[in-house]
Image (cartoon, grey):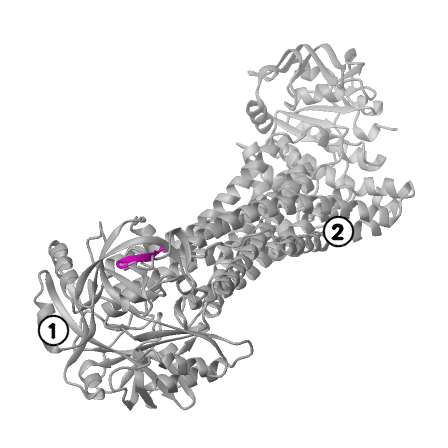
Amino acid sequence: MTSVSSISPGSTSQDSECVFHVHAVSKSYKSGDISVIALRSVELDLRAGEFVVFLGPSGSGKSTLLNILGGLDTPTSGDVRFRDHWLSQADDAELTRFRREHVGFVFQFYNLIPSLTALENVTLVTEIAENPMDPKEALRLVGLTEREHHFPSQLSGGEQQRVAIARAIVKKPDILLCDEPTGALDFPTAKLVLDVLAHINKELHTLVAVITHNSAIAAMADRVIRLRSGEIVEVTQNARKASPEELVW
Amino acid sequence: MRGQATAIALVIACGVASFVSMRAMYLSLLRSQADYYTQHRFADVFVELKRAPDWVAERIRQIPGVAQAETRVVMDVTVDVPGLQEPAVGRMISIPARQAQGLNALFLRQGRYLSPTGGNEVIASEAFAEANKLELGSELRAVINGRWQKLRIVGIALSPEYIYEIRGGGSLFPDNKRFGVLWMSAETLEPALNMKGAFNSIAVSLLPGANEEDVISQMDRELDSYGTLGAYGRSDQVSHRFISDEISQNRITATVIPAIFLAVAALLVHLSFTRLVNTQRSEIAVIKAFGFSNWQVGAHYVEFSLLVAIAGYLLGCGVGWYFGIKLATLYAEFYRFPVLVYRPELHIFFLAALITFVTAIAGAIGAVARAVSLPPAEAMRPEAPSRFRPMIIDKLNMPFISPALRMILRNLERRPLRALASAFAISCSVMIIVVEFGLFDALNRMMEVQFRDIQREDIAVTLNEVHSARTQFELAGLPGVIRSEEFRAVPVRLRFQHRSRKTSILGLRENNELHLIVDDHGNQLSLPLEGIVLSSTLAGLLGVVPGDRLSVEVLEGKRPVRSIVVAATVDELLGTNAYMNLCALNRLMHEDHSISGSLMQVDAGKQEQLYQRLKQLPAVAAVSIKAAAVNSFKETISRSMTLSIGTLIIFASVIAAGMIYNGARITLSERSRELATLRILGFTRREITFILLGEQALLTMVALPFGFVAGYALCAILAIRLQTELYRMPLVVQPASYGLAFLIVLFAAIASGTLVSRRVASLDIVSVLKAGD
């Protein structure tokens, strides 16, 4: 495991390029005859190299927002722009290309391909990426060089999640979207995984967006965005980013 | 599950349809034949002879075991059919002036029976009349006893003796345009043929329990001095022979092909249900937790599989019934039955139902057993995550294999039995298609060997009796004849030890070019100057090998009995033939250079002129035109085989498609989470589809060569099983047949792949973000 222990001031990323513009975004779902509003007029900018944590209880709309940022869903109204990609109007093929070129995903339940080894899971993504890093390098970054020939069923939860992170970063994405990345892990393992995320954010200057309902994680973010009932209720700029070792829950 | 249930139902339907149609067709032929024979009193024993006075018939009637004996005059004559350039052969058969309860009774399809003072009235066979568009009142001209006579058609009829209307003597396919039967009143025909008070053919019916062989040998003794060609039973009667062969072939195919289809259906049910049970583990657990018993849960799945089976069964019965009628109608064209009995045979449907339900239950049972054996608590948990470990492909160390291909290979390797079962089912489809085309290839090869390699003449002229060599010069001098080679055909009974066989020896002149002796591989055998050459089928029947000495009982003229050495055997495809050098045959017969006819190569431009002359030559009994025979063969094949081959190919394609579709659907349901994850990671639909269908594509590719090999093997088995005395099926499967099978299965695979790939679009990719393993 690579040791990471850097504390960055929140202000450093404020000067960086703004990559995501979210303007007046609303999203509603039809559930039977009832219309459920998941997001209401959300305004948000995300900058390159930023570490952002979205906090909120179930049903607050944080997953919906992540889906829209990740190009998995489109808003009912409003605009979402990633650099020169207008995601709000994009069709399936454009969204796929956007995800392929710019986004790395980390899932709560890892979602590794069980029939592929750790290294192959990572390599699989390099086949569709334009300028990927060496898959072994990606595994080295998450500290799993020695486990590269293991199948997911032979790895612990934390190891699996680190493979998932390696898979997400191997294509050198502009943004790493993590949906409850520690939700299925115990405390020490979760800290290891968060350590890797912080390291990636620092070393590769990747915009990392983590959604979680675990408020302890908020301490390691540059910015903390709280949602409730589909609205952003609070944005906090951390004066100091805590290192994952400092976190307690 | 709707799509999968539909696929299973369709595969079952194909199995049931093939069973119902083929089985019904088989029974229909069997019953039509039996009914017809009974109602029209088809004779049991037949004999042709040179000439015997009427009172001899009484002696035949006295033979113990004979119920009824009817004499008649039968003669093949040259017929001039309006609208037909070349001469046709009419088989004139005398019938009583008044319709009586005789043997081989005619079934009048149109018109009337002959009037008592009929004169030139004839009744024509239906196939001949139809082929030449002859109607009631149409007139023909025939050379009867050297004189042209006008014949007027007053009736069109069928006879149990000519259900399959061919001339005999080696021809395999009907040429209804150029050969037909004409029945004429005995009072008119006998004197016209110089047969007043005499006969040259007898049909005999036997008493129940009579020994046919005894009657035949007694008849042969009685008729020995009247130039008998030897009495024979139904089994050697040409039309009966063909139909019986056809019926027994039908029985073989009606068993083999549905069995294959239904076995595949059972496999498919099993694979699909195993998967269904796996996806419904938690529902099963909940139901069991509520207190439902194993039996109730099991019954639910069995009911479901039966529901699918019933749907397939009903569809299969409908389709099978429809194709059965189509096939029956087709058979009616070749086999002239008054009524083709095609009635719903309840027991077929019952048997089909039984087979279907056994198939469905056998297919579902393993899956159901697993479903009910799970304790509720365990079933409530999701199925254990797939465990993979390094497998063969990893040991082979092939770094160039992409991860996507690795996924496909590892998944196949992890469930080897399932992969095998799928590949097996697909290769069954390939096999059936290869076999169907292979049968077609075999027939084409038979035609090629017969009409290209062996019979090289344009026309064969048969004389009405044995002529001297001078006639050959006359024939050679006819207009348009480029080359002419005389031949001698002698009807004989060959005998070796206790075995004997009726055939005719064909005497060909030395260095003949128009009729070669060619084996099934196309190798030519030059006719030895001495001794007899037998087709290997005939040699097998007689149990002789080259060097053995045969006894030859000549069945014409002075009927000498000689002996001759078997010089060679030849693996011929058609018939039970015997060949000799013409001079050697003449010597054997103690005759001067004598001929029975001539083979001719003809200038196409002068054909019409030649036919006109041949029609006028009284010595000419028959003219066979090779091109006409080839066309008739081709037409018969294309008409009779297109439907049956087409139907089976459609069934086989449905099975391949059903298998591939279900395989892909199972993959999709098992791996939707994986595939959705890949979509999120930026894989396009096309790339996902590749991974989804790659498994099926690979299985199909593996199944194809196995299907080819199995198809070839089944062709080899069928070539032996479908062999009759009349012909041997050559074992040939052309590359094009494999190619077509490949294309058809590929098309079925692509079609079902396309259906499944549409579901990739509807993968719920967002849900996998939240769902745990």
**Horizontal and vertical percent position of residue B32:** 51, 59
Q: Within 10 angstroms of label 2, few (less than 14), some, or many (20 or more) residues?
A: many
- Disc 2, SS: helix
**Residue A203 visible:** yes
Give B612 or B526, whichever is nearer the viewer.
Answer: B612
Label 1 Cα neighbours within 10 Å, binned few <14 / some 14-19 / many ≥20: some
Residue found at the far right of this picture: B291
Subunit of mark 2?
A: B
Say whether residue B541 is visible. no
Q: Check whether the beta carbons of the residues at disc 2 and disc 1 lie within 8 A of each other.
A: no
Q: Nearer the viewer, mark 2 or mark 1?
A: 1
Q: Position of residue A117 (x, y in %)?
A: 66, 46
Q: Is residue B767 above or below residue B427?
A: above
| Residue B177 quadrant | bottom left
Q: Percent from the top left, x then y, of residue B690? A: 55, 40
- Name the residue nearer the viewer: B350 or B769: B350
Q: Residue B507: which numbered mark, if any?
A: none
Protein chain holding label 1: B
Look at the image and tell me in which quarter the N terminus of chain B lies: top right
Which secondary structure type mostly characterizes the magenta part of the structure?
strand
* B215 with respect to B388 (left or right): left
Q: How many numbered marks are there? A: 2
The reply to whether the magenta stretch includes residue B123 is yes
Q: Look at the image and say whether residue A223 sits in the magenta stretch.
A: no
Above or below B725: residue B496: below
* N-term-proximal mark, 2 vs 1: 2
Q: Which residue is mark 2?
A: B367
Going by the image, does B109 lie left or right of A33?
left
Magenta extent: B119-125
State how far apart marks 2 and 1 are (Cα). 81 Å
Residue that badge 1 annotates? B471
- Name the amino acid type tagged 1: Thr
